[in-house]
Amino acid sequence: MLPRKSIIPEEFVLPVITPGLVRKPRFRDRPQKARFITKSGACNLAHKNIREQGRFLQDVFTTLVDLKWRYTLVIFTMSFLCSWLLFAMVWWLVAFGHGDLNPNRMGIDPCVTNVKSFTSAFLFSIEVQVTIGFGGRMMTEQCPTAITVLIVQNIAGLIINAVMLGCIFMKTAQAHRRAETLIFSRHAVIAVRNNKLCFMFRVGDLRKSMIIGAAVRMQVVKKTTTPEGEVIPIHQIDVHTENPIECSNMFLVAPLIISHTIDKTSPLYDLSFNDLLDSNLEIIVILEGVVETTGITTQARTSYMPEEIQWGHRFVPIVTEEDGVYSVDYSKFGNTAKVAAPRCSARELDEKPSILIQALQKSELSHQNSLRKRNNSMRRNNSMRRNNSMRRNNSALMVPKVQFLNPDGSQNVPET
C-alpha cells in the first residue's frame, strides 16, 4: 500500500523553510551596565589588591562589627575558651610549683584546694572568670602568686566581656537594619510640575517610629572625559532637591514625593527622552536621619538607571481620609499614571514654551475624546439594557392562545 500524500505541499512545511527566510529579531539586548548602587542600597564595589592588611587590625572593634555573623560567633566562643584554657594552664603551673599535685604531701595547705589535675584547674579557671563559685575549690593565703593570677584573670575576663558583648550589641543595633523599613519607589518619573520638567520619586517609612531630621540627597554618577583627555569613571555631581515642605528636613510621617526641578543648573537639563535612554548616567538617592528609638543615625540608599525612569508619568495618590484617620495604601506605592509631557529636553522647553502648550492641548483633546467615547458607550449600554428590559416585560404580559379540540379531532380556536 502506498503512503498517503500530505494535503499540504512539501514546500510549505516548516522544517524545510530555508534559514534565509527566517526573520531576525528587530531588537537587540542592550548590554547591562554595572550600577554603582544596587536597588537594595548596597555599594557594587569590589576592593582588590589591598597590600596593607594590617590597617584593619589597628581598629579591631570595627573589624569585628563588620564581620559576618558566623565569624563573629566563632570569635566570641573562641575568645572565652582560649582565656579559660590559658588561665587553667597558669593555675596548674601554680599548683605544680607549690607541690599541690603531689599526693604524698601532707600537712601543708595548698594554694587552691581540690586542684589535683589539669581538669580541676580548668574548672577552677571557669569558676573564677565567670564568678560561679560552686564552693568545692577555693584559694588560700599561702600563695601570693595565686592572688596575682586571680586579679589578672578577673581584669582580663572583664575586658573580654566588654569587647564581645559590645560587638554583639553593635551588630544587632546597626543603622542599616532600620533602613530596611525605609522604602523607595522602584521607578522614578519625569513629568511637568508648575510648568517645569521635574524628576520625581517617592519615599516612605513603614514603621510608626519617626526618623528625626530626615534629609534627602541626590547625586548623578556618570563616566565623563575632561577637555584634557582624562577619563573619570565615577564622576559624582550633586543635584538639588525640593522637599515638599519649605525646610531642610522632612517630616516623614507619610510617603512623600521628592522633586528635582530640571533647570539650567541640573545635569539633566540637556537630556531629552531619547537622550535619556542612550545615556550612561545613574541617579543615586540617599536618605539620612536619626532613629527616634535608638538615637543612631541611619542611611538608606537606592539608585535609578535610565530604563527605570518613566517619562511622562506621575505617581498616583495613596493617602486618603477614612473615618477621621489618614490611611496609606502601600499597594499603590509605586503605581504611576500616564500624563502629558513633552519629550524634548528642558533646554528646548525653555527656548520654545509653545511646546508645552501644544502638549497640554493635545492631552486635553485626547482626554475629551476619551470622555466622549466613554459617554457614548455608557449611553449605548443603557439603551440596550432598557430595550432588553422592555422586551422581557412585554413577553411577560402576552396572553397565551388556547386551542380546543372538537370531538371529531378538529381544532377550534376561540375568537379574540
Image (cartoon, rainbow, N blue to C red):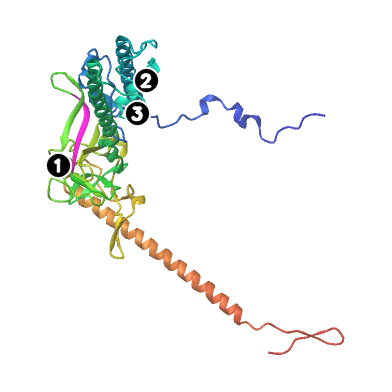
Image quarter in which the C terminus is found: bottom right
Residue at 51% of width from left, 73% of height from top? 387
**Residue type at numbered disc 1:** Asp
Q: Which residues are magenta?
A: 214-224
| Residue 219: in magenta span | yes
Q: Which mark is residue 134?
A: none
Is 366 drawn above or below residue 414 in the view shown?
A: above
Describe residue 403's horizontal placement relative to residue 349 as left or right.
right
Q: Give the residue number, with chain letter if any, for mark 3.
A: 135
Image coordinates for residue 235, horizontal then vertical, percent? 19, 27
**Residue type at numbered disc 3:** Gly
Q: Give the residue number, with chain letter if any, for mark 2.
A: 114
User: Spatial distance from mark 2 to mark 1, Cα to Cα?
Assistant: 84 Å
Q: Give the residue number, with chain letter if any, for mark 1.
A: 263
Residue at 39% of width from left, 10% of height from top? 104
- Does residue 178 appear in the picture of this structure? yes
